[in-house]
Image: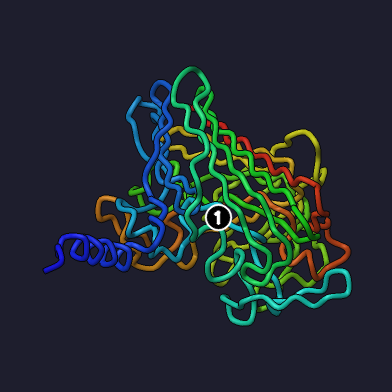
Amino acid sequence: MQNPLPLFCFLIFALWVVANGAESKPEIGFYELKTGDFSVKFTNWGARVVSLVLPNKHGKLEDIVLGYDSVEEYVNDTTNFGATVGRVANRIGGAQFILDGTLYKLIANDGNNTLHGGPKGFGRLVWKVKKHHNEGHSPYITFTYHSFDGEEGFPGTLSVSVTYTLTGHNMAVKMKAKALNKATPVNLAHHSYWNLGGQNSGDILSNEIQIFGSHITPVDKNLIPTGKLASVKGTPYDFLKPASIGSKIKGLPNGYDINYALDGGASKKLKTAAVVFDKKSGRVMEVSTNQPGVQFYTGNYLVNVKGKDGFVYQPHAGLCLETQGFPDAVNHPNFPSQILAPGKTYVHEMLIKFTIKG
């Protein structure tokens, strides 16, 4: 009788391959950067920020970004808490665009439109952790992703990276992308929901905000830009001078979800996009960028979302300041172009500064 051991071992191996796949699946995990009393945690699921902890004016440490406790909750997330979104952030009207005479049809995931790159998008994929250096005065972490030609309907192969760096109480975010073989639209954005009073402190309506944009890109009923620019003066969108969010939000049906055309447009140097102040905690957050726009969103569609430590988020539990190119720019030639030529590199920089006042 033939020795049954080799056959038995082969069967065990075959069952393992069926259960686990021929190649091991990418691992999803949490990673931390820390400098003094300032710490930020991340996950490579969507290259996300999952917590950001720093002291208030009394020295109490609190987490000021909305999120979840487990990897599984992030995998099932529909809010894009803390995510890096793309290949094209925000909305593309009709889920299509024409580039160099070719019509590209995307996957609609927001009515008839494409939102944040499609049903998967970069925020719902596993990124590779290329570097993780958690020592010294400027700890950093770099995530990378290789987007294939035709992914979610977009043309061309794209090499993408996101690097987060801490210095003092500041977090720098650098998003880069290189088009490898075809022209393609690129507009990456960071999608943290901020609550300077703490992620479990209620709504952000008492927060005071200043936005350095004299114009918005008005939208239709489906939140697609009309292609025009409109002055904010005399409207609920006017935050050229600091004002509480709650003092103006009553003039809107749901809340804020609009792109501001930043004064000065796109630039090589960073410029201030917005400043937020929470009087109770004393925390001030200043967001700077090299991009032409910033989407101000007040978490209008958060309804009974169970977050960290079982806290349930409701509308306006957090605010987003998504520095970006203009929404639907691929369908509006008058908007700043987002088309990245083969061999060229897209660089999107953000600097988020935290200070204490009062």
**Residue 64 % position (x, y):** 41, 42
The residue drawn where x is 52% and y is 28% is 166
In which image quadrant can residue 260 be found? bottom right
Residue nearer the viewer, 281 or 53: 53
Residue nearer the viewer, 300 or 111: 111
**Residue 280 % position (x, y):** 41, 37
Disc 1 marks which amino acid?
Ser
The residue drawn where x is 70% and y is 61% is 235
The residue drawn where x is 43% and y is 31% is 33
- In this view, which residue lies farthest toward the left? 1
Tell me, yes or no, if residue 116 can be seen here: yes
**Residue 105 % position (x, y):** 71, 78
The residue drawn where x is 67% and y is 61% is 88
Residue nearer the viewer, 155 or 347: 155
**Residue 18 % position (x, y):** 32, 68
| Residue 358 shown left or right of residue 7 in the figure | right
Residue wearing tag 1: 247
Q: Relative to 335, is 320 above or below?
A: above
